[in-house]
Amino acid sequence: PAVIGDTLHAFINPATRTIKLPEMPFSFDDVSRLTIVACGTSFYAGMVAKHWIERYAGLGVDVDIASEFRYRRPPLPKGGVALFISQSGETLDTLAALRYAKSKGQKIVSIVNVAESTIARESDAVLLTYAGPEIGVASTKAFTTQLTVLACLAVTIGRDNGTLSKDEEAAIVNALTELPKHAAEVLHHDDAIRELAINIADARDVLYIGRGLGYPIAMEGALKLKEISYIHAEGYAAGEMKHGPIALIDQSVPIIVIAPSDELFEKTASNMQEAAARGGRVIFLSDAQGLAKLGDIASATVELPKVADFVAPILYTIPVQMLAYHVAVHKGTDVDQPRNLAKSVTV
Ligand code: F1P
């Protein structure tokens, strides 16, 4: 809650309830398409941003993994802008991708947590997250603060190009401002999430599913579980389940369903029913409205506060990260220093 609040504090003017980002040496009005590049958790932040920027600002976004982008060397739009997201600001693939984009004449914006990092230094504009030091190797609060900054960026682009009205901006600003309070409420579920974690700690595979803004959060949940508890996990777009992963489902496979009661709820709910019908152990993350509709078919539920659709991915990240944390603690793995992982991947 504190670092989301700190990040919002940097970008929201509480008197006018408007978002104010630092000056950029270009205008997004002149940009026909935005390219976002990052690795790991930061890449999932880019996936959420694609959804926000396309939906709320009407600007098309390509989002790519840095290690693919840098070697594929795709053509980039003339006078385009490329956005790089990195907690450390030192990830080599992301830096190499940035240098490629720069060589193709792109304006470079970065979102980093470390102001003195190489990626920040080589950017035309830097948006800082205020996550404070990330002690653990696996990014956690870096992700929620990256999302917070990206939310502010999406609103700014949408407002400046006229896609988003003043009232819509104010409604999103209100929802963002409430987030630290809601995040604190989620932390109160710690005991319940620990219990869930103990129940899934023996699983060999875990599936995470979500739709729309919930899809990247499913991927983030699966990555965190892999990174710190060494359980194989997959994050899937809920609608993709029938194209393969459904074959995995039996009583031994926990399925974590991320489904706030938004416009896509019914669709995700039907995927959840398919999973439950095949004996899968469904763990359902939703708000009171969603749980009232379908809580019964899940083997376990976590009730989250009802929030505006726009901010839900930030909130739903917290329980999936907590779940991974408790599984790791229960298994006795090193949560802060997982095997084989480095904080900044500079090779
Ligand atoms: C990216 C990243 C993290 C991940 C892991 C290794 O780092 O892949 O997302 O959790 O710890 O590094 P960064 O570019 O965001 O610093």
Image (cartoon, rainbow, N blue to C red):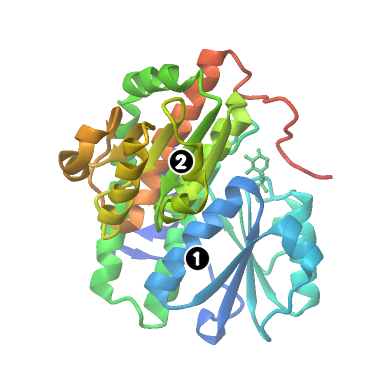
Q: Which residue is mark 2?
A: 208
The quadrant holding residue 157 is bottom left
**In the image, 168: left or right of 28?**
left
Q: Tell me if I can see residue 213 in this picture.
A: yes
Q: N-terminal of the two: label 2 or label 1?
A: 1
State whether residue 17 is above or below residue 90. Answer: below
Q: Quadrant of the C terminus?
A: top right
Residue shown at the point (81%, 75%) measured from the top left: 103
137 left or right, relative to 67 = left
Type of amino acid at the residue the image marks with label 1: Lys
Instruction: State which quarter of the image contains the N terminus.
Output: top left
Nearer to me, 226 or 267 = 267
Counting from the top left corner in percent of width and height, residue 150 is at 48, 59
Find residue 102 and report its horizontal and vertical position in percent: 76, 72
Check disc 2 and give the amino acid type.
Answer: Tyr
Q: Position of residue 143 (x, y in %)?
A: 52, 45
Residue linked to disc 1 = 50
Give residue 16's quadrant in the image.
bottom left
